Every structure is written in C-alpha cells, then in structure tokens.
Image: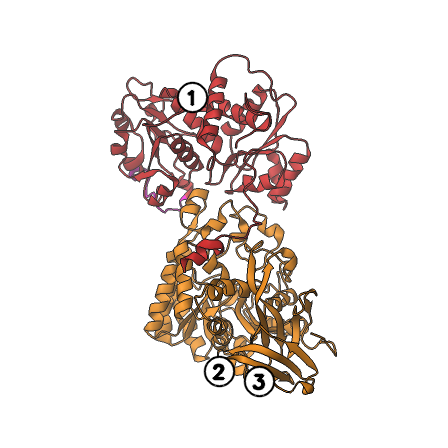
Chain colours: A red, B orange
Amino acid sequence: MSTIVREGLGRPGGTLRAMPDATRHLLQLEGMSPATMRALLVRAQAFMQPGEKGKPLAGKTVATVFFEDSTRTRTSFVLAAKRLGAEAVDLSGSGTSLSKGETLDDTARTIEAMGVDAIVVRVKQAGGPHLIARAVKCSVLNAGDGKHEHPTQGLLDVLAMARAKGRAETFDLTGLTVAIVGDVNASRVARSDVIAMTALGAEVVLVGPPAQAPRSLGALGAKVERDLDAVLGRADAVQMLRVQFERHGGKGIASRREYRAGYALTTARAKRMRPDAVVMHPGPMNRGMEIDDAVADGDGIELPRSIVLDQVSCGVAVRMAVLERLLVGGPGDGPGDGLE
Amino acid sequence: MPTTLITNARVIDPASGRDETADVAIRDGLVAEIGRDLDRSIADTVIDATDRIVTPGLIDPHVHLREPGGEHKETIETGTRAAVAGGFATVCCMPNTTPTMDRPEILYFVTSRAKETAHCRVFPVAAATVGRQGEQMVEVQMCQNAGAVAFSDDGDVVQSAGMMKALLTTIGELGSVFMQHCQDTTLTQNAAMHAGTVSTKLGLTGWPREAEEIIIERDARLAEVTGCRYHVQHISSAGSVEIVRRARRDGAPITAEATPHHLTLTHEACDGFDTAAKVNPPLRELRDAEAILEGVADGTITILATDHAPHAADEKAAPFEDAPCGMIGLETALSIYIEALVNSGLITWPELIAKMTINPARLCRLDERGLGMLAVGDLADITIIDPDLEWTVTSRELAGMSSNTPFLGRTVRGRAVATLVGGEVVMNRLNPHESVQFCRPGRAPASASF
C-alpha cells in the first residue's frame, strides 16, 4: 500500500514551479554545497585583508529592498556593493506599494525594470525572496525571510568563528562544537547558522526553553539540549540569540528572571566557559537580558573573548564575496558561474 | 421525452449490488430499464459504452462554489461545469461565502442561482452558527426548509464544546447531519502547513495532528450522547483515522471523508514554498496518507470527497504564509481515486463507486430523493467512466475558473467521459477526437449524436 504514495502519487506533478536557479540567486544555504560555501568564505577572508579591492562591480546596480526594519544588514550590503564599485540604491520605500495592493512580485518586477542587477530583499514572510526570484531575471539575495533563513548571516558567522578559531585557511570546522542559545525556533539566523556550520563539519547544539527550542529542531541536523551549563563546558563558540518576547504571546517564557536563570549568558556562566571559547551575537543585543553587559564585551582575559564586532566586519566581506560571485563570477570562475 | 439507451456497459450500482454488463434505458429523466440486449429500435439516442463503466451520478458532499462573494474564484456556473467535467452529477456546496450561507435568504439565493446557471444538481450546506463565528446558532429549521442538506461552519471549527452540543442536539432532532472542519484553533495560530520536518526547515509555523484529533475525540463523544449524525470533513491524520475507527466500532453515529490530496500527497509538496500545496488541513506525512488509504480500504472512511477550493492565480501567487488555503479537485478527483485506490488494488470498483455515490447520498439524505442509486425508477443521474483513458492534468484541460492544483502535470489513467443529469447528457467527451462538450440541464439540443 505504501508504494502508492511512494511511487509517483506521493509527489506532485512534474510542472510544479521548481526551485529558482541557485546559480543566479542566494535564497538559502540549504542545498548549497560545502565547496561553494568554502569558496565564498575564502574570498570573503581575502576581502578582510587590507588593500585595494578593485572595482569588479563597476557599472552594476544593487538595490536594497527591506520590508522589515534593519540597519546593519542593509548598511552592510550597501557598503559591500560600493566597495566593489557598484552603485547601491535603497528602494525600501517601495514597500509602501504593497500597502496599496501591489503584489510582492509586481513590486520586484517594477524595481528590476529600473535597471538593477541585484535585489537584496528582506521580507517578513518565509519564502518571499523565492517568490521574487521566480518573477525577475536579475539576481535576488535573501537578507532574511521570516523565520526561514538569513544566508549571508550564516556565512558571516562561520567566517568570524573560523577566524577566531584558526580555521580560516580551510574552513573545515570538524571537531568544533557551537552552541546556539535562546529563541531558536523564531530565528532565521539560527537556521542558516546550523546549515552552514554543520555542512562544514561543526557540531551544533541548540539550547533554549522547550517552547522556543523544541526537540523537533533536531530535523535541522543539530542537537537540542536544555542544560546550558553542561553545553558551555564543551562549546568552542557560543552564539546568543535575541529574545523576541513580543513574539510569544505569553506562551513559553514566563518571566525575565526565569529565562535568565536557565538560558542567559551571565557573567558567572561565562566564567565557566572554556578559556579559548568565543562569544557571538548576531545583534541587536539586549544587554542584561540574554547576555550580561560585561560578557558582551569580553576581552578573552577575565571573560571569554567576544567577537560580536568582528561578526559585523565579516558581514561586509561576506556580502562582497556573494555579490561578486553572483554578478561577475568569483576569481577563477567564468562570469555567472554563481552559486551552484 | 425521447429515450436514451446506454449499451454494453459494465453497470455498477452499489446500492442494489449490481455489477454486470448490461444496457440502461432512460426515459423521462428516469432509469426505465436495465438489462441485456434492450431493444435499440425504441431509442432516440444510443450511447455505446463498451469497455466503459456506468455508475450512478457521482456525488461530492464537499465543494466550494464561491458564489456569492467570491465570483473571481469560481461561480455556481463554472464550479458545476468543473463538477460535470469530473463526472459529478451532484455537489453539496459549503457555506463560507460572502455573505455566509447562515440564513434562509442566502440559501434561497444559492438554490435559485443554481436553477438558473448550474450544470448539475446543487444542494447547499448551511452554516451552523451565524457568520460561522461559533457564537449563535443559525435558524436551523428554517435553513433546512430552505434546502440545507447539512450544517457546517467549514473553514472554521465550532470551537466551543457547549455550542457543539447544542447544535448536535438540535440538528439531530431534525435528522440532519453536522459536518465538522476539525481544527482546534488554539493549537494552530499562524500555522501555514503540517508541523513536521519540512515546516521546521522552512521556518513556517506548524499545524499539528493533535489539533484535528482533539476535536474528533470530543465530537465523537458528543455525537454519541446526542445521537446526532456527525461527519468528519477532509480527514488528514493517522490518529484521526484511528479515532474514527474506534468511535464507529463503539457505535457512535460518525462518518468521515477523505480527499484526493490527503491520501496521495505529503508535506514535501510544500517544499520550495509551493502555494499550490497549501491546504487546510495540511498535507501531512507518508504514514498519514497510508493510514487514510487503509481507512478507506477497511471501511472506516466511507466517503470520498474533493474539498474543491478554487482560488485566483494572483491570490495563490502570494508568499506562502499569506496565500489562501485550498486546491481545486472536482476535475481530478475521480482519476486520482481510481489510480490510488482501484488501479493499486486497494479496493474494488463497486467499493469506490459506493464511496462516491450511495454513501454521500445517505449522508445528506439524497437517497430519499432518488440520488446515488441506479435502479429502475431512480433519477437518471449517470456517470460513464473510461477506466483506461489516460490524460494529463493541464490548466487547459480544466473546466472551472481556477487552476490551483498540485496535480498539474500528472498523468493519470481513468476518467469520466460523460455525465448525465436527469437523463440529459451535460458533459460529453465520449468521442476522443472531439473536444469536451457541456450542456446545462434543460438545454439539450433536440438531437445529439454520440
């Protein structure tokens, strides 16, 4: 009986809208090969070195279209585009057309018609960038879609961690344990982090309250644990996530003190981390909530080293690497080889 | 009225147990005679049905015709054209229209629009509560008098157990049936698809099985204590099938329907954010589909419906979370059921036809009106099926207004080639070299050739 579903009928018909072409777009890290991730990371690491970067994207136009609030990601993409010689234009105001009844794909086609080569988009709905990618011919870069993914954040977190752990030559993370702590299920950062880090060989442990870090997250390829202290004892890097109190409607997080008792990276907890471990946070941080003030600025002597600002620097480099590869091909690639 | 003769068919009528090669004579809109080698000289029209199957007109107890209020998605005219295209001679339409079918005036509007425009028989299902809000009971008796054959807040559940008990008590006394959309909405806030590995990966909020199962458990108990007939719409989870099986064994007056998509597709179809696969209740996992197939095979699930739910292309082109739930099904259901249930060897032809004719007829007491059966004296609502006809589902093949189906591109074997309503051929694709022809009842040309 099961064969009925398995053979043929279990799958939809053949003319379904297929996944958009991954060589032109960066929509998600899921499905990207470790080799492609490494190539991007190697190039981003090169961009982190001082020196002239040239103008490989001269004549190209990159539009940022953010339908959700953001400062650092949008600015980071704009700087990345400009540093490679592209023109960067922010069209986030186009979002007002949506409230006038325009569909997301019409908005995207309108922006493309202005002559842009890449649309960097953030939307509140998971899969929004995929929808746009199906509608336009230019490249689409996902800068965060709902709770789904934030692919450049995943890559920049790997870059920052690999640099701190001496893995920035090979980007082989085998043997490293990364803890991602907090409001995991609501986090697109966590999804992209898990995919990138596990693809490159790290072990990822997700820690958070049961309702925010349900066991079902194991499907992502990470472990789910509850005892933060036990995990901290073996973690090489700890990524703290912002608690999004406003998103839970009273379910799951009873109070600030209860949350902090179980899942905050307090000064006392940070002191029990491995001395060579690093503290990460994708920002914006709520100091005193998920992370103590002193821990956020840890210098690696009294407290574990915080690489929060290095993550931000790596963000620009990663976005340069992605834009270059999508728009003109990376070094050694033919143009348009993109992200296979 | 002229006589039509369907010759040399495999005639399947589950209600009378008939399954034999025979001719069927139709006169005055009724079945006049069934037998071997009937006299052709008396016939004005002869339809050669050699190698074809003749059944009572198929009945779908769960469709959304969208009129009034959603005429950009479907109308009674286009929805019933889709129905006859798929072999259905009768549909029961759900009350989630705008305005809601929650009072006799709206039901009269639907039945009179159906008289003016429909290609097949249309029976309305009235809302159970005003505005489908779950707070105030509709005028149940007046709605029944106005033609309602069942009551349902479909699309929404009756969340309150107290309201549910009052409804079942009242509806039960009238001999009608309550059809529940089983979804404890406190467990499905913001849900976009089945709660499982795919929703976890896509970052979409999940709609867990237990939201359906809890309502069925509760309602089975209420059906038992009130004695009211209770029907589970579009069953989607393995646990639900088990609950219905147990409740039926315990004697509760409970029935359940399957849909083509819940027994052949899984949540994997949503991957890549494909909104064609977004439906409520959602597509679940292999074990759920297998349990539903098993439930159909062992008689737990006695009715095969479609939940035909048309949506405009631009509505389905929204991001997954914003896109409306639902898929069309009238044109593809019979083919999918033949493939999944009969061609696979799971059930026999008569068993399939029973679940698409006499069983839904009894659910809505349409058997008392001569529907769902094919014996001498019954209404000549008839479906002719070519069990070997292969066809590919394309939007060009679809007769309704919308084409939101995840089965696009699928090639299937087995299809309705003619639908008769009251003895008139309202859909005809008997000749493979001609395109399909539609004709509303009462508008048949004086002479037709087949």
Task: Using the image, tell me which numbered label, if any, was put on residue B36.
Answer: 3
In whole angstroms, how far apart are the C-alphas of marks 2 and 3? 17 Å
| Residue type of the residue flagged with mark 2 | Ser
Observer-nearest residue: B11 or A52? Answer: B11
Please state the horizontal and vertical placement of residue B419, each as a whole percent of the image. Answer: 62, 72
Task: Using the image, tell me which numbered label, if any, was put on residue B16.
Answer: 2
* Left or right: A333 as drawn, with respect to B46: left
Which residue is identified by label 1?
Answer: A310
Q: Is residue A257 magenta?
A: yes
Task: Using the image, tell me which numbered label, if any, was put on residue A4.
Answer: none
Binning the other alpha carbons within 10 Å of mark 1 as few (below 14), some (14 to 19) or many (20 upward) gives some
In whole angstroms, how far apart are the C-alphas of marks 1 and 3? 87 Å
Binning the other alpha carbons within 10 Å of mark 2 as few (below 14), some (14 to 19) or many (20 upward) gives few
Write the start and end of the magenta stretch as one range.
Answer: A248-258
- Quadrant, the N terminus of chain B: bottom right
| Residues tagged 1 and 3 counted as in contact (Cβ below 8 A) | no
In this rendering, is residue A170 above or below A102? above
